[in-house]
Amino acid sequence: MIQFKASYLKQLKHFIGFGDIRYYLRGVHIEPYSEGGAILVATDGHCMMVVIDKDAIVTEPKTFYVNQDLFKHCSSDENKCLINEETQRLEIVGVAGNELFIQPGKCFVEENEKIKFPDFRKVIPDFELLKPIMPSYVSANILDKLNKVNLMKRAKTFPIRFWSNEEIGTTIIIQFEFYPEILVAMMPCRGYDHVQSMEKLKKNFKFNPAKNNE
């Protein structure tokens, strides 16, 4: 039986590739964590959220679909998501073990060696090489996702930190001050404002305030 905190699904949902032609992106990936518990991952191909649930139970990697009706039962930190690996039945249960939601049909995504959920290890850079940065460009799409995840509600100051290995076109890691178990990875094409983009901007941006003030 797979078991993890249901409230993480409400945060992961903003990174799930709902409607994507790559059907395996329409679900959430879960696998055992080396230090105990599980890692949950969701991505739409442009950005990725990774969550560590140290109280989760899972024995092997699985990717599962989630129904949109499920999320309204995931607000409480006390609720659990349970998945029966034999029947593929997914349900949300309350603190007393009462059933709050049962997802229709089987939940596991069919995968093989050629078609499978992206490996987060190939997206996230080596942490030993990461340095704090302030990116020159952040996609409005990603800012919208971060706002919807609502991880900033506890803070009076801006509680997000950006990290990268400082290479042009690398993945940027977003860290949340009050949620060390969660991180977001911005894929390279969404991270830096490349030099060639800056050159294009200089070439096409006709208005020059300095000249107008002479």
Image: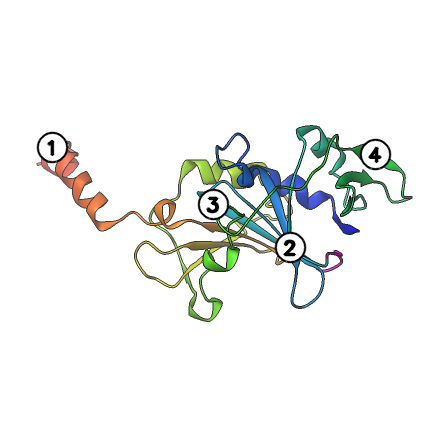
**Given the image, on which type of amino acid does mark 3 rest?**
Cys
Tell me the crowding category of disc 2: few under 14, some 14 to 19, or many 20 or more residues within 10 angstroms, Cα based: few
Per the image, the residue denoted by label 4 is 100
Figure label count: 4
Which of the 4 image quarters holds residue 92? top right
At a point 32% along the width and 61% down the height, the residue shown is 167
Label of residue 47 in the image = 3
Choose mark 4 or mark 2, whichever is in front: 2
Per the image, the residue denoted by label 1 is 212
What x and y, as percent, mark residue 113? 52, 52
What x and y, as percent, mark residue 20? 49, 33
**Quadrant where the image shows the C terminus:** top left
Q: Which residues are magenta?
A: 53-58
- Vertical arrangement, residue 107 with respect to residue 191, above or below: above
Tell me the crowding category of disc 4: few under 14, some 14 to 19, or many 20 or more residues within 10 angstroms, Cα based: some
Label of residue 76 in the image = none
- Vertical arrangement, residue 192 with respect to residue 19, above or below: below
Secondary-structure class at tag 3: strand
What x and y, as percent, mark residue 53? 69, 56
Choose mark 1 or mark 3, whichever is in front: 3
